[in-house]
């Protein structure tokens, strides 16, 4: 197969020697160049959209025939993210071009370039930031076709382009919004790294702490995969070691009582208190000591447990 550069040279030579047949030769050469590029995406006739998910995540996706899936992935507590999931990646593992194309029936309209995004050797092969993902969604609402274009990994002379069809998008977008509306306010990673802080000598949680704990409790009560909660009390190093240990004990026990009063099974809770043994900041500064006066909350989740059927998203009637 001739490269684009070789084909260009052949065009120049043809123009030197041909007269009446040169336009035909040029047209044939241009067709060969076009065939060197690979275009993937649904046509207007075979575009399909699918919405699936649960209270933990939503997937709004379009199959890309022969290539994979274009997915708008929305996890609880996060913004939406565009992903390209391939059956077999054909793009080089370097930055690809991100573009919004006019629909095929408006060929004279201008394309909009949104910069580049790295193609990676993983699943998904490509993920867009929230800003450009929302630009993709907005473009689809306007009937435009988002696209990713890049050099083939096996041949720098070939281009691979994957586009997302806007056909029927407006019919399925409300269903996607239904799915987003029923998501939990936070995801497992977010609630699993929360903590409550205490003032110097304080042993009781306040209203601000309760608001943080309520977020964790709400998640636990809605995710049956959570089977254990570890509460760890800590203190700064200002007092005697024994006193600091007792203060950390009082703090973690107050958090434990709040969990129980809000309906968490006591059998799920494990409390530990460490005094000043495990600082996370410098105890020589006031800011550091404030960081060390804390109770941390860690959840354990059954990764192999499927999401219960009653938590799976199902569109409402008419959606």
Image: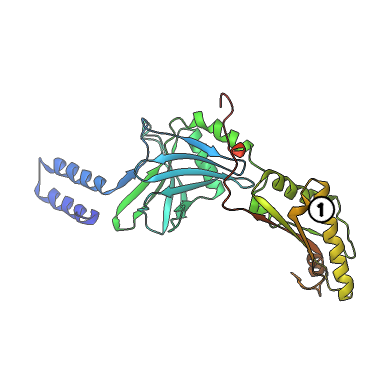
In the displayed structure, would residue 138 be above or below residue 266? Answer: above
Task: Say which of 66 and 284 sits in front.
Answer: 66
Residue 42 horizontal/vertical position (percent): 37, 37
Q: Quadrant where the C terminus lies?
A: top right
Residue 248 horizontal/vertical position (percent): 84, 65
Residue 106 occupies which quadrant of the picture? top left
Callout 1: helix, strand or loop?
helix
Q: Is residue 6 left or right of residue 249?
A: left
Q: Residues within 10 Å of mark 1 (few under 14, many from 20)?
A: some
Residue 299 horizontal/vertical position (percent): 69, 56
Q: Residue at x 76, y 71 (%)?
A: 279
Task: Say which of 165 and 211 sits in front.
Answer: 211
Q: Residue at x 56, y 52 (%)?
A: 304
Q: Is residue 272 left or right of residue 105?
A: right
Task: Say which of 227 and 243 sits in front.
Answer: 227
In the displayed structure, would residue 169 be above or below residue 271? Answer: above
Residue 198: in sight, yes or no?
A: no
Residue 253: in sight, yes or no?
A: yes
- Extreme-front residue of the structure: 267
In the displayed structure, would residue 81 be above or below residue 144? Answer: below
In the displayed structure, would residue 220 be above or below residue 297? Answer: above
Task: Say which of 146 and 238 sits in front.
Answer: 238
Q: Quadrant where the N terminus lies?
A: bottom left
Please state the total of marks drawn on the protein image.
1
Instruction: Identify residue for label 1.
Output: 209
């Amino acid at each position: 197969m001739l490269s684009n550069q070789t084909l260009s040279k052949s065009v120049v030579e043809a123009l030197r020697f041909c007269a009446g047949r040169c336009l035909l030769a040029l047209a044939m050469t241009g067709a060969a160049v076009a065939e060197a590029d690979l275009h993937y995406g649904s046509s207007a006739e075979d575009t399909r959209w699918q919405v699936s998910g649960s209270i933990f995540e939503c997937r709004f996706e379009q199959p890309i025939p022969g290539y994979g899936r274009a997915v708008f992935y929305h996890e609880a507590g996060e913004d939406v993210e565009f992903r390209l999931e391939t059956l077999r990646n054909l793009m080089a593992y370097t930055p690809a071009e991100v573009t919004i194309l006019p629909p095929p029936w408006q060929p004279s309209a201008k394309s909009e370039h949104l910069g580049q995004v790295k193609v990676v050797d993983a699943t998904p092969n490509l993920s867009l930031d929230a800003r450009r993902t929302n630009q993709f969604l907005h473009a689809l609402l306007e009937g435009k076709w988002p696209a990713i274009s890049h050099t083939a990994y096996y041949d720098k002379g070939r281009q691979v382009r994957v586009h997302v069809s806007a056909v029927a998008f407006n019919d399925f977008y409300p269903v996607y919004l239904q799915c987003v509306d029923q998501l939990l306010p936070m995801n497992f990673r977010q609630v699993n790294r929360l903590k409550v802080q205490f003032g110097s000598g304080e042993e009781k949680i306040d209203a601000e702490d309760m608001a943080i704990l309520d977020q964790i409790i709400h998640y636990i009560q809605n995710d049956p995969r959570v089977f254990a909660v570890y509460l760890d009390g800590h203190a700064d190093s200002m007092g005697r070691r024994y006193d600091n240990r007792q203060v950390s004990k009082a703090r973690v026990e107050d958090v434990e009582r709040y969990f129980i009063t809000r309906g968490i099974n006591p059998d799920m809770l494990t409390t530990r208190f460490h005094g000043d043994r495990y600082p996370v900041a410098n105890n020589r500064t006031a800011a550091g000591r404030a960081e060390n006066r804390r109770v941390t909350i860690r959840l354990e989740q059954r990764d192999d447990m499927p999401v219960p059927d009653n938590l799976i998203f199902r569109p409402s009637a008419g959606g």
